[in-house]
């Protein structure tokens, strides 16, 4: 039977979306399919419920929005019993397709606040889902919080609903430790995080019915920290600018003020802004429009027909909420939940058994969990690249790693500020402004490469290169690992590690995340044509890497022939390599030579190798050469829609990993998490 959890809040001040996201993520790392359901929400169409849409988008759910909502508020008011019957029927229809369900109770919009919690308790009882109770701690003392919990428990008992656990959110950070201690295992405490309630520029756009005149639309997701009404002189305005503020000005002042404000936004000497809102609805004169258009303004500039006072009033009253496009807010919410709530305890209380199926989402979540459990220090040499900075922002919000960015602090800070990223927790190191480190690294590099005739002077020039500088930080214990390659070539990234950190034959694996399992392919990125000895070493190292990331290794040594059916130099190489693997690692399940279909398809395996413990069940696939490997992983990636994570290097004393220059932000996040886990294993 599908296990579900019902997230019910006691009042409108609670942040259900944070708890729903965190719970769904924890379940997604345990089972292959998690569904979302909201018993009551607003109308369909354009008024889609933001929590449902956020969960559907975040966890790539295939259920239609209409399937995830049981009834509308109007249905409950008109005929509560009929609405309840529809809710129960709709829930079970969706739940039948998933291993676990996250049910998000009504949001104190229209059911009626005096009876709404009772209604949610009644729904939970009818669905057979235990309640994860959410209580707001905003403006409440410890005694009042405990009273609210007690009353909610009585209501749950009255409606015959069971309590799974309690989460008290929006607690003053100074009071959180004391409240957590006094709850004594009865619940979890989430501190207040102002940025979760801060509106985005897009929220202000909707509130003020504004349109985008200038700037990039993707910047509308930036969080707003405050407002400044530009009703004074330019020097006074510039003196009052604060980070992430929105400047509100009458449109007839745009020609005088907007160029200077945009210049201040891009200047390292002024704080970065979130945007500008022009009021009054007046069209800009043609010469002013031509001037501003020619300036290539990157700061988002909105225009509204409202006058300045109603615009400022609406903007000041706008509160942020978690929605599908609020990426930074979502990551912040997930980080806050993971830090405060023992997700494994929630899963154990639900008695959700871990699925034998491993989805890409489960693999990625497990990576982040493992990285977060024992944070490591990872250096990112490409410290001004936008994708790297965005990945760093996400990793820091999730507490997945301690990060070092290489580059000028001024440039890195300005770039991050322009993108609306919070990298305050990262260390920024400028190789050009660190002569002491350059000398230390040059001395160490010259010592390691003395047999190659490297002098101190040559070493000094070499270690100034970002990839070498980052690698030497790893070598000298100033970082636990390095990730690069979003801009640099593979050779630029891995050559320093070959010279400094090599411990044996260096090879690579890709984690191929299919719809229902994770496979390991090696070596698809480093060794062009390994001989039998090298191929055996790659197989043993790849099996060790697979086991280190939770993949039970069953090794298939791939060839164009299976068993003893074929001959030729290429098949003989694989046959010799297989024998060497059995000799060096007798505990490993290995088969070779074997064709790919016999290795992965149980039906083919029964025909070709019926007595093999690997055939049809292989998890680690070793290719005979780089040509085959590159074709194989890219073919599977494109034709099967697999997520390819890697290449992950092996054979180094400390981890260094390469990125594709086409890497997406998510790819960088995954690679950093893998590097952090490798660093844990290297201890």
Image: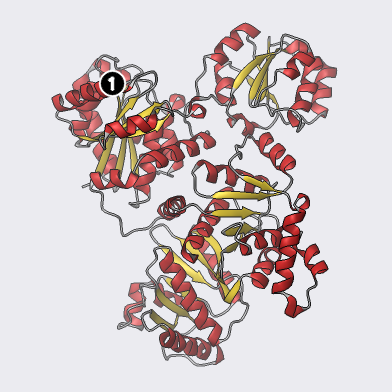
Helix, strand or loop status at disc 1: helix
Above-or-below relation of 366 to 320 = below
Residue 333, percent from left and from top = 45, 36
Residue 465 can be seen in this image: no
Find residue 496 and report its horizontal and vertical position in percent. 68, 67
**Counting other residues with Cα less than 10 Å from the Cα at mark 1, is it few (<14), some (14-19), or many (20 or more)?**
few
Q: Quadrant of residue 410?
A: top right
Q: Residue at x 26, y 40 (%)?
A: 4
Decide if residue 516 is on the left or right side of residue 388.
Answer: left
Looking at the picture, how far across and down is residue 356, in whole percent? 31, 60
Disc tally is 1
Of 194 and 120, the residue lying toward us: 194
Q: Nearer the viewer, residue 124 or 386?
A: 386
Question: Image height check: is 620 above or below 124?
Answer: below
Q: Residue at x 67, y 24 (%)?
A: 275
State the image coordinates of residue 445 (x, y, percent, origin top left): 71, 68
State whether residue 493 appears in this view: yes
Residue appearing at x 29%, y 45% in the figure: 345
Query: In which quarter of the view is residue 248 placed?
Result: top right
User: What residue did someone put label 1 on?
Assistant: 143
Residue at left 74%, top 16%? 237
Q: How is the image coloured?
A: secondary structure
């Amino acid at each position: 039977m599908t296990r579900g959890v019902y997230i019910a809040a006691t009042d409108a001040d609670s942040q259900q979306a944070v708890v729903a996201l965190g719970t769904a993520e924890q379940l997604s790392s345990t089972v292959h399919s998690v569904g979302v359901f909201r018993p009551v929400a607003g109308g369909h169409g354009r008024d889609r419920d933001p929590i449902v849409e956020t969960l559907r988008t975040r966890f790539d759910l295939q259920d239609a929005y209409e399937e995830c909502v049981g009834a509308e508020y109007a249905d409950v008011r008109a005929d509560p019993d009929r609405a309840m019957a529809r809710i129960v029927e709709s829930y079970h229809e969706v739940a039948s397709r998933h291993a676990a369900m996250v049910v998000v109770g009504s949001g104190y919009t229209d059911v009626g606040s005096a009876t709404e919690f009772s209604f949610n308790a009644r729904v939970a009882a009818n669905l057979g889902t235990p309640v994860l109770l959410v209580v707001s701690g905003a403006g409440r003392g410890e005694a009042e919080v405990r009273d609210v919990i007690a009353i909610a428990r009585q209501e749950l008992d009255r409606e015959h609903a069971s309590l799974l656990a309690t989460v008290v959110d929006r607690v003053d950070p100074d009071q959180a430790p004391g409240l957590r201690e006094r709850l004594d295992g009865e619940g979890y405490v989430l501190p207040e995080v102002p940025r979760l309630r801060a509106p985005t520029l897009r929220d202000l756009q909707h509130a003020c019915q504004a349109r985008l005149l200038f700037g990039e639309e993707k910047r509308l997701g930036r969080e707003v920290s405050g407002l400044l009404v530009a009703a004074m002189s330019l020097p006074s305005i510039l003196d009052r600018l604060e980070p992430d503020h929105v400047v509100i000005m009458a449109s007839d002042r745009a020609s005088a003020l907007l160029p200077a404000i945009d210049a201040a936004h891009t200047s390292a000497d002024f704080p970065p802004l979130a945007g500008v809102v022009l009021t009054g609805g007046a069209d800009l004169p043609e010469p002013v429009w031509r001037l501003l258009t020619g300036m290539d303004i990157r700061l988002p500039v909105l225009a509204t027909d409202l006058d300045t006072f109603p615009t400022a009033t609406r903007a000041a009253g706008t509160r942020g909420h978690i929605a599908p496009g609020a990426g930074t807010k979502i990551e912040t919410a997930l980080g806050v939940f993971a830090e405060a709530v023992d997700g494994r305890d929630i899963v154990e209380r639900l008695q959700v058994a871990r699925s034998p199926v491993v989805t890409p989402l489960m693999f990625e979540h497990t990576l982040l969990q493992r990285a977060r459990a024992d944070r490591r220090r990872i250096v990112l040499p490409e410290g001004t690249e936008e994708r790297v900075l965005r990945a760093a922002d996400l990793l820091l919000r999730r507490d997945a790693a301690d990060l070092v960015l290489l580059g000028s602090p001024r440039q890195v800070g300005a770039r991050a500020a322009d993108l609306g990223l919070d990298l305050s927790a990262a260390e920024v190191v400028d190789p050009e402004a660190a002569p002491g480190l350059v000398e230390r690294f040059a001395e160490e590099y010259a010592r390691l490469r003395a047999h190659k005739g490297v002098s101190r002077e040559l070493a000094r020039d070499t270690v100034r290169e970002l990839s070498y500088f980052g690698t030497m930080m790893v070598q000298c214990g100033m970082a636990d690992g390095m990730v690069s390659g979003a801009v640099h070539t593979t050779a630029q990234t891995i050559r320093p590690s070959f010279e400094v950190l090599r411990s044996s034959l260096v090879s690579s694996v890709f984690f191929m995340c299919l719809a229902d399992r994770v496979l390991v392919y090696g070596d698809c990125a480093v060794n062009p044509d390994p001989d039998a000895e090298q191929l055996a070493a790659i197989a043993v190292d790849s099996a060790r890497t697979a086991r280190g990331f939770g993949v039970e290794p069953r090794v298939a040594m791939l060839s164009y022939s299976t068993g003893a059916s074929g001959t030729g130099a290429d098949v003989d190489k694989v046959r010799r390599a297989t024998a060497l693997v059995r000799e060096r690692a007798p505990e490993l399940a290995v088969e070779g030579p074997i064709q790919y279909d016999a290795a992965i398809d149980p039906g083919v395996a029964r025909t070709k190798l019926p007595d093999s413990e690997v055939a049809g069940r292989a998890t680690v696939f070793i290719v005979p050469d780089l040509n085959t490997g590159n074709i194989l992983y890219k073919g599977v990636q494109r034709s099967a829609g697999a997520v390819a994570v890697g290449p992950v290097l092996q054979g180094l004393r400390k981890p260094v990993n390469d990125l594709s220059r086409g890497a997406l932000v998510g790819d960088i996040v995954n690679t950093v998490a893998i590097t952090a886990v490798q660093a844990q294993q290297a201890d």
